[in-house]
Amino acid sequence: MFTSVVQAQTDQEVTESRLKGVEFLKSQQKEDGSWEYEGHPVGITALCTMALLENGIPVNDPVIRKGREFVLKESDKLKSTYDLALAILLLSRVGDREDKVQIRRFAARLIAGQTTTGGWTYSCPLASASSLNNPRARPKLGTSPGDNSCTQFAVLGLWTASRSNINIDNSMIGVARRFVETQNEDGGWPYAMPKDDKAEPSRNSMTLAGLFCLTVARAAKIRSLQEEQEKEGESRASDQKEGETLVSDPIFAKGLEMAGKYAAGINASSARYFLWSTERVGVLLGLEKLGDTDWFSRGASALIKTQKEDGSWENSRGKLADTSFAILFLRKANLGSDISRMLNGEPEKKFQIYTQAKKPEFEKLEDAVTAAKAGDLIRVNGDGPFRIPHVEIDKDLTIEAGFGYSPVFVYTRGRNKLGLRARPERDPNVRHILRVSKGTLALEGIAFEFDPPEVGKEIPWAAIVVNGGNLKMLNCTISEQNDKGMAAIQFLKPTDSSITNCFFVGGRAAIEIEGTGKQTVLVDGSVLFSRKIFSILKSSGASAGGDINLNISHSTIQGEDVFDFERFVKNIHVKSDHTAYKVDNLGLSMLSLKSSKENRSFEGDGNVYDVDKWLGMSGKADPGVTDIKSWSRFWGNTDDDSLEETISFVQRRPNNSFNHRYKPEDWELSEDSKVAARQYDLGVKSFNVGAGLGFSRFRSSILYNEWKQKQVAEAK
């Protein structure tokens, strides 16, 4: 079991190895969208498709779309435990609303397939989804002992399905009992349960399977208790972290010790299935080492060493499964990222400077910001809502949601610079939640609910103000519902900022930009629902300023006016691709001169417009621009491949009806929309949008790593 140390690998070598594996899997897909593996056509197709998704192939890529379609086409009589579990993983990862029906059906079959021993065999009965709400309608449980390999796949599938409001509590009670009662003396677990009181020897992959199943069972129990506490109005916080109690549990601790011994033996001949099992437990528990072994470094080195020229890995059953397991390992794909919070509990002090040596924690955000150094990361380990008194950011800083948390920041009046209670009706410096005056502020997974107090007069509120420096927002939500007329974001000085996967609801404007000089604002994969979307303001200084670049991509926009530009601001350039516009006025105040492109430009690609009035100056329509053809012609035929169609979303949200409870998926294209067939290349991918669940999904994908790398590169 123990071998010499494997040579460590570089990040570049890991990336190159992953990409070679990706290209191999893509090359093996058949015309019907499947991959071939005897006895498990759906399972292997789901596994390969999911491995490609986790390694950066976008959900709208034909290889992903064809893989999903094959899984759905072959699902009616699907009974294999492996196939059912993997199909749930894939469909959940794709995130299509329509697939929830299938996920429930597959979950019902898995639940019905559990035996009285708490485990699963290779096959499950064809139970109906209705049995989820009526346990008496399920088939009688079988008595077969099952095996721990099938069981860990079923547990992974059920945990994933539980995110779609499927109750798995009873199933997990049986799982916990199974692994508690069948642990071997050495701390490991075998493939099969003991026969005639004679235990099989422990196996490396099955020991990791046992740890994984016990972790999920514990997380399910914690979630159930939390839900009961919330119903009774109790706090979810606890004095002791559940992760610590799990790791210190004698059975779990003994299994973890054995896993460390197995990790020390990772070498070039280690099964890729074992490595994948190791990776899931290591990432799930946040363990960089198992025992004294850096399991990822050893595993990655072993995989890189054994990868074939064609990019594959192989065992006696072929190349597809092993290649999928290998690139999932190298990706460090966390297929259970929402468990970590349940295991670790909620700390008393919620704001942690994660990048400092002692990881200090603070009760207030403003104290953490003051203690942070340039380049630090503040992690918010709590939901809140947190009352934030107009905090100033004057250095490079990242503020992100802790794993499993959905922090909400709300406005409160604090103190002004003199230490007196803030008077927002008089002091423009206290009309926001956050203000950036210097450096780059990166926000990840934070929700801002901006309902300022009544102060007797109209005030130009803004949730976030950028008065110097840059803003990088990822999966944030900004909303209002008391209709005080906020701007979600104000850019008052030259900036290079980006808004990615965000969700803005309400206010006088989604984004306001003062024409003070060269500025670039990117909006990507976001839903913007406001009165005005992009409002360009004349500079408050002596110069009219200008040279503003707005880049909009794969977004969904609803409101009264999209491009509301001050006519005296010079040089405003707009690029828009694959964005859905459902608006009253597209650019009724877009021009600086009547019927002239002077100081303005627009480039479009693959957009869809549901527009009443198209273009004009100072609120007056240009009679020569009345449809998509004349719009494109006006801008020099730069938007010829876009469409003019009626757009309908799954939820009808009238303009100016703003609410904190709205969700990004409300803006998915409805089935009866004329452009519904373009849902994969038009507008947002709602399952990756906004704080909370959207951020959790995006964070667990390879796209998050790419976003991080881009920020680092831009900073350099």
Image (cartoon, helix red, strand yellow):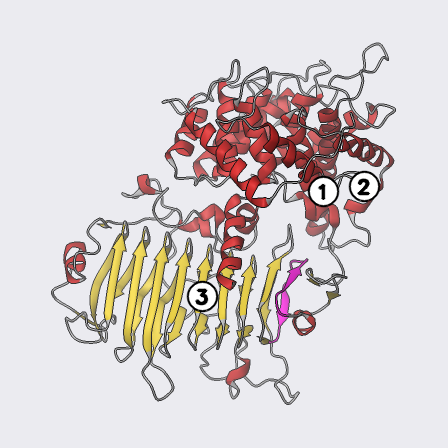
Q: Is residue 380 magenta?
A: yes
Nearer to us in this view, 136 or 629: 629
Element marked by disc 3: strand
**Residue 694 placement (x, y as % from top left):** 52, 49
Residue drawn at 62 percent across, 71 percent down: 388
Q: Which residue is mark 1?
A: 285
On screen, residue 412 above or below 382: below
User: Would residue 317 be seen by someone viewing this image from the given angle?
Assistant: yes
Tell me which amino acid carries mark 1: Leu
Residue drawn at 34 percent across, 67 percent down: 549
On screen, residue 584 above or below 681: below
Image side of residue 517 versus residue 83, left or right: left
For the residues bearing labels 2 and 1, Cβ distance under 8 angstroms: yes
**Residue 301 placement (x, y as % from top left):** 64, 35
**Real-space Cα distance between discs 3 and 2?**
42 Å
Q: Is residue 156 magenta?
A: no
Q: Counting residues from the N terminus, which is met first, the one under dot 1 or under dot 3?
A: 1
Q: Which residue is mark 3?
A: 497
Residue drawn at 39 percent across, 29 percent down: 66
Tell me which amino acid carries mark 2: Val
Nearer to us in this view, 590 or 303: 303
**Real-space Cα distance between discs 1 and 3?**
35 Å
User: Would residue 133 be seen by someone viewing this image from the given angle?
Assistant: no
Element marked by disc 2: helix
Of the residues tagged 3 and 2, which is closer to the observer? 3
**Residue 41 placement (x, y as % from top left):** 49, 19
Span colored in magenta: 374-389
Tell me which amino acid carries mark 3: Ser
Q: Quadrant of residue 97?
A: top left
Q: Which residue is mark 2?
A: 247
Element marked by disc 1: helix
